[in-house]
Amino acid sequence: MGRKAQPKTEPKTPEAEPSTAIERSIHRLDAVLTTCNTDTLALLPMLEQAVSLAEGIRQIKAVLTDEVMTRVFMPLQGTPLGFLHDRAKAEKGPKEYSIAEVRECMVEAMINGFRPVGNEINIISGRVYGAKAGYRRKVVEFPGLTDLRLTPGVPQSVGEKGALVPFRATWRLDGQPMELVRDVTKGADGHSRDTRIAVRVNRLMGADAIIGKAERKVLRAIHDLISNVTLSKVTLTIEDGETDAIDVPGEVVEPPPVPGTQDGRRMKLGKDREPAPQPEPPKSQPKGDAAPSRPAHGDTTDVDGYGPVIT
């Protein structure tokens, strides 16, 4: 009897499996991020969030070895093609962040859905800051969102280092028209409310740069609204801040109000006048008469201080 014919097998293509250590690391990183990201974590109970997040951070750091960081992420540092940072113009100290510092920032950024390219993030004072490009992409790519329109107004200078920018944004979410307005508006009680965007103005900054900073804040507000982000659901938050060393739009941490200012306008107290003393609260009230404080009816200001949203 002749030998039994063997079944033919298709040759394996070399592209079927990652061929290098870097490619294998990238594949592992993508697999971890599919489950360890803020969108997925927000759907879990609190304790499961903590367990999943801790395990995800451990796995991501294990993937981001010094070799992977050196070959993939460190060359992206300091260029708008990658990500900018505040040490490039430092007069003293290192001109770049170390591998360990960049690794920590990449872990936080990627879990929050930002990419290490296209200047979607900045590193400032060793922390991650989501840049305008990152929030724009996340908003534009949000499922069901279409027809995004951003309409800035003319910035109004406030002092030497500040400006207020009116802004209007419209979009459709699953076909439903939505709107966000940041301007001087009058409420039902007849009182005016100024929700214009406060921007810190750096030296030699023009109107376009001021509007760019305001646009970043609007995109952040839209992102938080459409993704229903609240303090109770977010386990990792990209910091909000600004540095004079990076000439790109970034989220602004505004300084506290200057004494003697209100609604962006300086109040003149006069040479010998002092602010009127505030009345002292009553020391005690009859039991049962005190009512718990609660927000005014119709107040839609969210936890980040964004203005009312008209939908």
Image (cartoon, grey):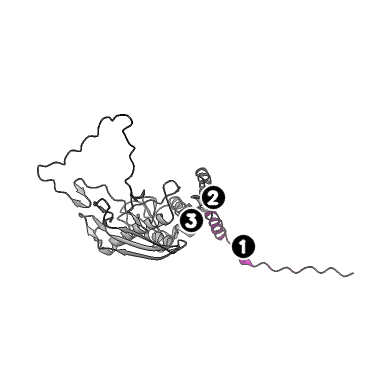
Q: Is residue 61 magenta?
A: no
- What residue would you read off at disc 3? 69
At numbered mark 3, what does the secondary structure look like: helix, strand or loop? helix
Q: Residue at x 42, y 57 (%)?
A: 226
The circle drawn on residue 17 is 1
Note whether 217 is above or below 259 in the view shown: below
Which segment did they paint magenta? Answer: 7-35
Q: Nearer the viewer, residue 78 or 269?
A: 269
The amino acid pointed to by label 2 is Gln
Identity, as a three-letter code, of the amino acid under mark 1? Glu
Q: CB under 8 Å between callouts 1 and 2?
A: no
Q: In the drawing, what numbered circle is on residue 208? A: none
- Toward the left, the furthest residue is 272
- Does any portion of residue 250 appear in the rendered image? no
Amino acid on which the number 3 mark rests in the picture? Met
Bin the neighbour count of mark 2 within 10 Å (Cα to Cα): few under 14, some 14-19, many 20 and up: some
Mark 2 or mark 3: which comes first in sequence?
Answer: 2
Residue situated in front as seen by the camera: 107 or 152:
152
The answer to the question of whether label 2 and label 3 lie on touching residues, with beta carbons closer than 8 A, is: no
Dot 1 lies on which element?
Answer: loop
Q: Secondary structure at mark 2?
A: helix
Q: Could you say where residue 142 lies in the image, as x and y percent from the top left?
A: 45, 61
Residue 68 in the image: x percent, y percent?
51, 56
Q: Residue tagged by mark 2?
A: 59
User: Residue 198's image quarter?
Assistant: bottom left
Q: Earlier in the sequence, mark 1 or mark 2?
A: 1
